[in-house]
Amino acid sequence: MDETPTPTPRMLSWARNSTIYRLERKMMTEKQLFDAITKKAKQKFEDISDAQIRAVADFAVKFAYDQNALNDVAYAEISARSGARSGKSKKAIAFKLASKGIDGDTVVAALDGADDLYAAVVFARKRGFGPFRRGDLDEKRKAKELSAFARNGFSFAIGRTVFEMERQDAEEVLQPSSMF
């Protein structure tokens, strides 16, 4: 292994190009970019030290920030809105953002406008639960629906509210003006 602490110009050029390629394809968090560059650098360069890997990944993250291509706050806000629109609870969205390396304060700020009731109604519509139920309700079906709400991070109160809603009330909750 090369024990030189500074990466070579070839490594830095590769890190810059790899960063551009990755961020053109999809929005990433700082942690995701750092991890992706670290993993790929280990594969690409045979005689690279841990210090060089860290320096290359740090260079890639700094380059992305310099280009305004990396923004964890914007990523968190976009993911929170998308998750709420697709029927994810605040708890599920927060867990996913935390696993992608977004800090707690940013997650809380991003989830500030999210509505768990709206997300639960969307979830019920997707799964055919509560007011969107197609079949008859028996005890087994009731337990299945309520436990699905709980497994997806919704509180018992919200799950029960959506479960007992009339279809017309659920449609009102889904009106575009009621989400954020």
Image (cartoon, helix red, strand yellow):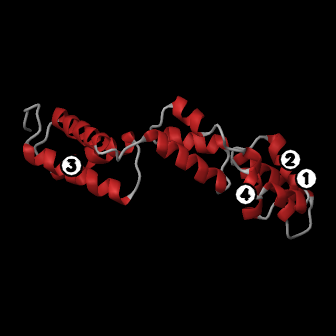
| N-term mark: 3 or 1 | 3
At label 1, counting other C-alpha atoms closer than 10 Å, the crowd grade (few under 14, some 14-19, many 20 or more) is few
Q: CA distance from mark 3 to mark 4?
A: 41 Å
Label 2: which secondary element: helix
Q: Amino acid at mark 2?
A: Arg
Q: Depth-wise, is mark 3 or mark 1 nearer the camera?
A: 3
Q: CA distance from mark 1 to mark 4?
A: 22 Å
Label 3: which secondary element: helix
Q: Is residue 173 left or right of residue 89?
A: right
Q: CA distance from mark 1 to mark 2?
A: 6 Å
Q: Depth-wise, is mark 3 or mark 4 nearer the camera?
A: 4
Residue 164: assigned label: 1
1 and 2 marks in contact (CB < 8 Å) = yes
Residue 160: assigned label: 2
Q: Amino acid at mark 1?
A: Glu
The residue depicted at 18 percent of the width and 32 percent of the height is: 51
| N-term mark: 3 or 4 | 3
Q: Depth-wise, is mark 2 or mark 4 nearer the camera?
A: 4
Q: Depth-wise, is mark 1 or mark 4 nearer the camera?
A: 4
Q: Amino acid at mark 4?
A: Pro
At label 2, counting other C-alpha atoms closer than 10 Å, the crowd grade (few under 14, some 14-19, many 20 or more) is some
Which quarter shows the N terminus?
A: top left
| N-term mark: 2 or 4 | 2
Q: CA distance from mark 2 to mark 4?
A: 23 Å
The residue depicted at 84 percent of the width and 57 percent of the height is: 172
Q: Amino acid at mark 3?
A: Arg
At label 3, counting other C-alpha atoms closer than 10 Å, the crowd grade (few under 14, some 14-19, many 20 or more) is many
Residue where numbered disc 4 is placed: 176
| N-term mark: 1 or 4 | 1
Name the image quarter holding residue 35: top left
Q: CA distance from mark 3 to mark 1?
A: 54 Å
Residue where numbered disc 3 is placed: 16
